[in-house]
Each structure stands twice: as structure tokens, then as C-alpha cells.
Amino acid sequence: MATKEYEQIPQAVMNAAVAQATGAQAPTYAGTFDEQLSELYDRIQNREDFSYDVNADPLYQAYKDRYIQGGKLAMKDTMGQAAALTGGYGSTYGQQVGQQAYDAYLKDMGAVIPELYGMAYDMYRDKGDDLLKQYGLLGDMRDTEYSRYRDALSDWNYQQEVERQQEEVEYNRRQDQEKTAFSRQQQAYANLVALIKASGYTPTDAELQAAGLTREAASALQTEYQRTITPQVSGSSSGGGGGGGRSGGGGGSYSSQTAEIQKQLNAMGAGLTVDGVWGPKTQAAYDKYMGGGKSGGTSGDRTVNVNGKATTVNSYGEVRTGNNPTRGEVSRAAQQAYQNGEITYQEYRTILRGIH
């Protein structure tokens, strides 16, 4: 019977089992804010340097218009006052002092330009700060999303590891069960083969199934057993001297098979010389202990319990009780009695030879 090889759990089997238990896909990072962050970053990095064009400043233009109007009014007032001094007539002096009043207003307008510059720079800086704040807010939202993704991925990996360990434990448990079952079958196989080879025992269907042995293989073993217990000699059994052959010619050749049978007969109490030669004494012992002939006698009688009743079977297969058990019942009872230590192995073999 072949030895079964076992391996560690195959990775493909492990992966398939874990994927089925936890889901085949790991959590993915959505990156909801990545595009907005990239756009903001570009705007911040590529923002133009601060510059100020006073003429393009609407506020400056408003100031300018107001100062010009004020200058014109101041010029008219000044020229009017000068005309009053001359009796209401215009003069070059009046024009000069009026222009001076107008220029004074425009000069005051130039003093406001630095203030407008500062206001424009503050606005530029505030816009930059707003972009940075917006970038920071989106970054925080991105970090929160990524942190949740990492938590989900960590949970998924943990569940994968738990399922992997559970699958490995279950796989090893199944492997152990198979090893145990296979070991038991191997032992049952070895025991049954040894029993058939030793006694020609006819196993039941359940015993064959438990041992993984076919009926054909068991029959072949029984045939082999019958060849081992049947001496290959010729002639009659009425010949002479104790060491001679069955034909009585004396001085037969040595046979290891005959020597083995003589040992078995001696174990039953025959008292033979184990010389490997089949002679009259060996033949007589064989007829007496193994049922080789019909010389009668009950020296091979053995008793076992069949269906609660003592059942005696002699060397010739004759059931010597009245409960009329079947041969299968006697065979199983003898096997159980031998396993329980109630009869010896030789007694067990005697019963089996009698009923088969």
C-alpha cells in the first residue's frame, strides 16, 4: 500500500479561500481632493509678483477726479478774490494765483499714492493668504480621507490575516484527519494481509473496505496461503521410515516449506524433528493437527463464543454444538476471541482451517 505524501497548504488554495471570506478587492484610495490641490498648488507657485500701476488703479482715478475738481474750484475762488481786488477785472496776477491753488491741490493728490500702493499690496498679500488657507483646508480634508483609507486597509489586511490563519488551521485539521484515516487504513491493510497470509482468513466486505483491499486481492492472498500449507510431494502416505518421503522411499530431500510446516505442527504439540523432510511422522501430525486427512479424533477441537453460545469446531470443520452457526459467524467469533486473548494464534488458525 503506497505512502501518502502531504504538503503545506498550497498558496493558490490559501488565496482563494481568503479572498472568498474577505472579498477579493482591497479598499482603494479615492483621492477626491487631489486634483483641486494640484490646481491650487500651481496657482500659488505660478502667481505673478506684486506690481502696482497707479494709473490703472480705480481708486486712484477717483481720488484724481476729486482733487482735480477741488483744484478747479480753488483756482476759481482764488482768481475771483484777485479780481475783487482789481475792481472786478481779470489780471495776469489772478491767473497766476489761481494756477498756484490748482497745482497745490494736485500736489496733495500725489501724497496719497503711497497709501494707495500700500493698500494694493495688502490686497495682493491677502489674496495669497486666502489661497494658502484654501490649500491648507483641502490638504486637511485630503489627509482625513487618506487616514480613513489607511484604517480601512489596515482592517482589511487584519481580516485577511485572520482568515488566512483560520484557513491554515482548518486545512491542517483536514490534513490530520486524512493522515489519521490513512494511517488506520494502512494498519488495517497490514493486519488483514498478515492475517490472510497466516491463516487463509476470509474477510468481510466491511473489513476489506476498512483496509482498502479488494476481494480479488484477498482471494489471491488466500490462494497463496493454500499453496504454503499444502506440501508439494507425490505418492501415498503409507511409506516407511520417519525421515523418508511420503512414498516411503526414505531419505527425502530438504524443503524449507516442509520445515516451516513442521515448526507450525510443533507449536501445536506434534514434537517433530524439524529436518525439512516430509515423512510418515510429519504426515500423521499434519493429519492430526491441520486436518490433512480423516483420521478422526478431537485433539484439534477449539471452542469460541458465537451469538452467546459456546461453539466447538474441530480440525475438520465440524461444528460440534447444536446452535448451527454459519461459517462466517464462527470465523468472526474466532477472530474476536484471538484479539481478546481468549485463544492462541495456533488455535485460531485451527478453527479457520476447519471452517474454510
Image (cartoon, helix red, strand yellow):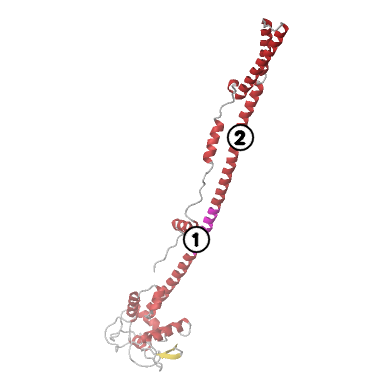
Percent position of residue 346, x then y: 42, 83
Task: Name which residue lies at 27% across and 87% down.
Answer: 236
Task: Name which residue lies at 39% across and 72% down.
Answer: 212
Percent position of residue 332, x then y: 42, 83
Task: Name which residue lies at 68% across and 17% down.
Answer: 108
Which residue is at the far left? 235
Element at badge 2? helix
Frontmost residue, 173 versus 1: 173
Q: Does 287 lie within the magenta span? A: no
Which residue is at the far right? 85
Please tell me in which quadrant of the rendered image residue 224 appears.
bottom left
Query: What span is in magenta?
Result: 155-172
Q: Provide the residue designation for mark 1.
A: 167
306 in relation to 260, above or below: below
2 vs 1, front mark: 2
Q: Does 169 lie within the magenta span? A: yes
Q: Main secondary structure of the magenta part?
A: helix
Asked if the residue at tag 1 contacts the one at tag 2, i.e. Cβ–Cβ closer than 8 Å, the answer is: no
Percent position of residue 115, x then y: 66, 23
Q: Provide the residue designation for mark 2.
A: 130
- Quarter of the figure with the C terminus: bottom left
Task: Name which residue lies at 45% across and 67% down.
Answer: 178
Whichever of callouts 2 and 1 sits on the residue coming sooner in the sequence is 2
